[in-house]
Image (cartoon, rainbow, N blue to C red):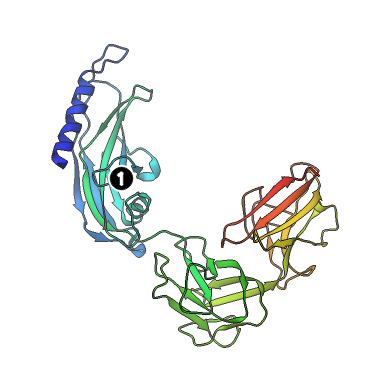
Amino acid sequence: MKNIFKKVIVASIIVVFTSCTKEDGLVVTSSEFQLRATTLNSPLVLNQSDDNNVVCVLEWDKNITSLPTVSTYTVQVSAMGSYSAEYAANNGSNVSGDLRTYTLKVGEINQLANKLPSYICGQEISVDVRIKAKVGTSDNAIIQYSNPVTLTVTPYPTIQPLLAFSTSSSVSGDSPKIASTDYKTLTDYEGFLYLESGTYKLYRPNGCNEFSSPMVYGLNGTNTGSLLLDGSNGYEVTTAGFYLVKANLIAGTYSISKFTTIGIFGTATGQLSFVNTPMTYDAVDKKFKLTFDLLKGKKFRFKLLNGNVAVSPVVVLGGTPDNCVANGADVTVAGVATDVPDTQKYDIVLDVNNPRKYIYTLTINPN
């Protein structure tokens, strides 16, 4: 069936290119050009530590047309036998038309395989690699494709790593979780959590964020700030409430800051820089809210508070002193600054429910 499919494609290409007449009177003729894998390591289980290792070296013939224009080439990856969703290698850039060779490495093919619709975390996948040749840049550009080379790989996942902070080893989807910035980073897990009283440990899932057999991190001592793999001690939460939890699995450290609310401060509030205005927590929406008059061209930030006093150590969201992040954008520690757009009364809403994806909105209040 696959061979019939290829023959149909080749026949279609021949018909298209032998019947296409450009504006200058040149008639384009062409046929499928050949792609070869001179080095091919497949099937292959991919590992992050091998990112620079070669999966395959590709070489292809020059595509033949009757046009004097030089062809440009792009390396494309798709699910085997399906080209409805193709992703370009080399960060989407063209490959030199003179060399007609490209080396696919573990890190790149892993990133591309993770994007494919047929990708399932932890499972083997077969992908087709083919070359797209393009002649011209207008809407009438001539496109040709090489034969595909099939690779079979088991990618490693590139999803955001999570840690559950739980009183039970039976971690569920509802268990409080903190997150790292990306799959390569194990040093900056954090999250804002509402915790009931109890004894908590950190649970690390597998690379697919499955908690069926997690690694358990207890404390090296009692509430000491030091983590211990398989440690028997847990963190004692004596008072239910809001907490900012951070962990560094490489250094083996953690920190937990309790707060009662989040406030705003800065010149945009029209108050002294050290004055904090507490927000109100909406238990239904699970968001912090405040309606307040802000000044155009001025700035504000969010700060964790106990009452009206900053927690110790001070935790600020939204950038360097007197800065805030853009409306509707992610709020981060040391975020990007922007100005209040106009002098108005605003409804300020801050959502810190998703770890490392904290979002606030600034909406004009008409009342």
| Residue at 53%, 72% in the rendered image | 248
Quadrant including the N terminus:
top left
Task: Please tell me whether residue 360 is drawn above or below residue 227 in the rendered image.
Answer: above
Which residue is the site of mark 1?
A: 77
Residue 170 location (% of width, % of height): 46, 77
For badge 1, the amino acid type reads Val
Task: Please tell me whether residue 128 is drawn above or below residue 25 in the rendered image.
Answer: below
Quadrant including the C terminus:
top right
Count of all numbered marks drawn on residues in the image: 1
| Residue at 31%, 54% in the rendered image | 105
Give the quarter of the image for residue 280. Answer: bottom right
Give the quarter of the image for residue 278. Answer: bottom right
317 relative position to 342: left or right: left
Q: Return the residue nearer the eye: 322 or 311.
A: 311
Secondary-structure class at tag 1: strand
Residue 141 location (% of width, % of height): 33, 24
Residue 190 location (% of width, % of height): 57, 67
Task: Please tell me whether residue 7 is drawn above or below residue 88 in the rendered image.
Answer: above
Give the quarter of the image for residue 282. Answer: bottom right
| Residue at 28%, 49% in the rendered image | 103
Q: Return the residue nearer the eye: 193 or 232.
A: 193
Q: Residues within 10 Å of mark 1 (few under 14, many from 20)?
A: many
